[in-house]
Image (cartoon, rainbow, N blue to C red):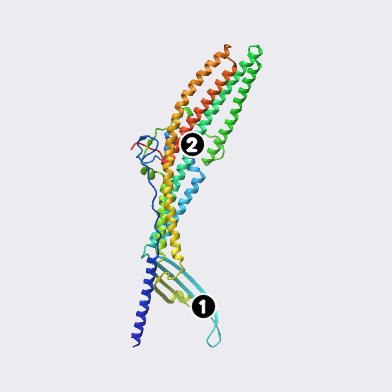
Amino acid sequence: MNGGIRAGAGNAALAATVAAIAAAILAGCAAKTPPPPPSALQAPDGWRTAVAAGMAAPADTRWWQSYGDPALAALVDAALQHNGDLRIAQARVAEYRARVAVAQSAQQPNVTYDAAPARARALTATGAPRTANAYVAEFQAAYEIDVWGRLQQQTDAAQASYLAEQAGLDAARLSIAATIASGYLNLRGLDAQLELARATLASRERSRDLARRQFEVGYSSKLEWLQAQSEYLAASEQVPLLQRQVFEQENALAMLAGGNPGPIARGRALADLAPPQVGAGLPSELLQRRPDIARAARNAQAAVAQLAATRGQLLPSFRLTVQGGLQSATLHDLLADPAHLWKLAGIVAGPLFDGGRGQAQMEAAAYQRDQALIAYENTARAAFAETDNALGAIARLREQLTVNEERRAQAEETLRIARNRYRNGYAPYLEELDAQRTLYAADVARLQLKARLLVATVDLYRALGGGWGPA
């Protein structure tokens, strides 16, 4: 009879446990996951600027060598080794690699131990004090059975985050290399402008001396001499201005390269630097080449996996525990003849009522997923725009250079005629001054356009995630 009662009680307890598990599972299944936002990303059919095809090859990770300048290549290599921001990004990659190991450890058994010698004085049942010793050595082992895949989803999320940081490091490398290349090319442009300013200053000095001699012999007026002196001073003013800009650009590049402010080694002159030929790839290829897009995609994967793991928290967890140990009243008996203790248990735990916290956590994870997906689309759109802008800039700058060459040729011929007319007494010195200014402006514009064209190709490298090659 008693056995029947005990069996009935056991069956009732089992039924209650099963009912509780079923209720928890139903509660988890009943949790509502907000759907992801519909994708609004549409890849363009082509670039707005017509260019030659041929960029299906993988990205060239050492694209800066295409400029053929050993000083530029050495500067970029130094930056990739010593730049402080890159070192921080590398440390972040190592951190997230360790986080993957932490997530993976949750899928493995957890074994701990403890040893607790104790001495206590207490009253016995008769009221007499008694002092007793207790020596206990125990170990515990626990293992969670990943029935719903929650632990695996957490590992997947950590792995995706790690890959996102690795892509972030690649993006940082690309950004540093492009910034160094742009800065160096701008520096060579400033060098060329400084050389032009010094040559112009020497020319203005000769014109000033000629105007002074003609004034002294009464061949021209003092006004013309003063105008020549004013032009000389205006040209002289440009030299320290450009020197300061060169100085600051050198310091900026030295800091980016991970060094102290200082001079920068020069390679090829601006006139000898030619922009690489431009080809065009498909937008789908662009998505695979840019590291920032890869990072956004990995972040979205991590958010999706984290949402699944958060949803798994609403379902019951199954854990096996094993506990064993030794206990004795004396240390000698603990080592020689202890009492053996053990415990084996299976634990099922899950939420029944948490005030809506689990549902709210899942909704928060869902909206984090949505943010990551939208961020991915925004990054892709930015990639399309940056590539189109770079292609358009290259095309328009080439057109400007063509017009500038014609403009400069006419200004040079105008100066030759004006100089001959002035020296032969057929025209005032003001005509030659105007012609000098026009030619100098055309020369400065030519150097600036050349530097901007080179920098525009760097921008295209940056937008495409690296160099291009034949398909």
Q: How crowded is mark 1: few (under 14 residues within 10 Å), some or many (20 or more)?
A: few
| Label 1 SS | strand
Cα distance in 3D space between marks 2 and 1: 77 Å
Task: State the quadrant of the C terminus.
Answer: top left
Q: Nearer the viewer, residue 132 or 3?
A: 3
The answer to whether residue 68 of the structure is visible from this angle is: no
Residue 376 location, x and y as percent?
42, 49
Please give the name of the residue rendered at 47% of the width and 75% of the height, measured from the top-left corner.
332
Residue 418 location, x and y as percent?
54, 16
Q: Which of 51 and 107 is in front in this view?
A: 51
Residue that numbered label 2 is attached to: 182
Residue that numbered label 1 is attached to: 133
Numbered tag placed on residue 353 in the rendering: none
| Label 2 SS | helix
Q: Nearer the viewer, residue 112 or 451?
A: 451
Tell me which corner region of the image, top left, top right, bottom left or bottom right, holds residue 422.
Answer: top right
